[in-house]
Amino acid sequence: QVRLAESGGGLVQAGGSLRLSCTASGRTFSSTTTGWFHQAAGKEREFVAAISWSDGATHYSGSVKDRFTISRDAKNTVYLQMNNLKPEDTAIYYCAAQTGSNRDATVRRKYDYWGQGTQVTVSS
């Protein structure tokens, strides 16, 4: 069992920045990839970014590439630095963990554990 806790959401003006954190506990050694997804009101949950714990390889959706940066510490926390935020980035942001290898990091159903989410609101 891997437990995930997100923090760092809030209200920010367009063009501003936020840094989200995802801290894992429990059987963290079993986690291979951690990803961030977001879900806007009335929409599907969508992939944002992911990072591999083995080699640090990263993946980004096209809408956030060059604005968001995913990183990890040496232990159990993954960060999502969000710069130049836009109103369309408003959503609940979830982190998720995979425990298998060679899975598509951009596909929601390939993740085994999910956090409760943190709200990000960007005002225009």
Image (tube, grey):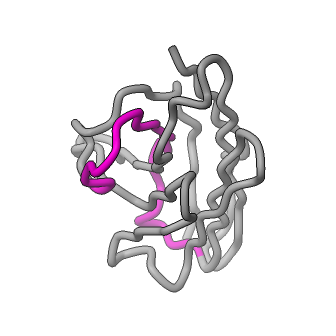
Task: Please tell me in which quadrant of the rendered image residue 65 appears.
Answer: bottom left
Query: Residue 37 versus residue 17: which sits nearer the camera?
Result: 37
Which residue appears at 36% of the width and 44% of the height? 39
Which residue appears at 52% of the width and 25% of the height? 116
Q: Which residues are magenta?
A: 85-106
How many numbered callouts?
0
Residue 87: x percent and y percent?
Answer: 48, 67
Which residue appears at 23% of the width and 45% of the height? 43
Task: Please tell me in which quadrant of the rendered image residue 79 appears.
Answer: bottom right
Residue 40: x percent and y percent?
Answer: 35, 47
Left/right of residue 103 with respect to residue 124 in the rendered view: left
Up the image or down, 83 lies above or below 9; here it is: below
Residue 14: x percent and y percent?
Answer: 60, 74
- Of the 4 image quadrants, the one containing the C terminus is bottom right
**Residue furthest right in the image:** 74
Which residue appears at 72% of the width and 45% of the height? 8
Residue 56: x percent and y percent?
Answer: 57, 64
Up the image or down, 89 lies above or below 121; here it is: below
**Residue furthest bottom in the image:** 66
Left/right of residue 31 with respect to residue 99 in the rendered view: right
Q: Is residue 99 magenta?
A: yes
Left/right of residue 63 with respect to residue 42 in the rendered view: right
Query: Residue 85 versus residue 62: which sits nearer the camera?
Result: 62
Up the image or down, 116 lies above or below 39; here it is: above
Q: Is residue 95 magenta?
A: yes
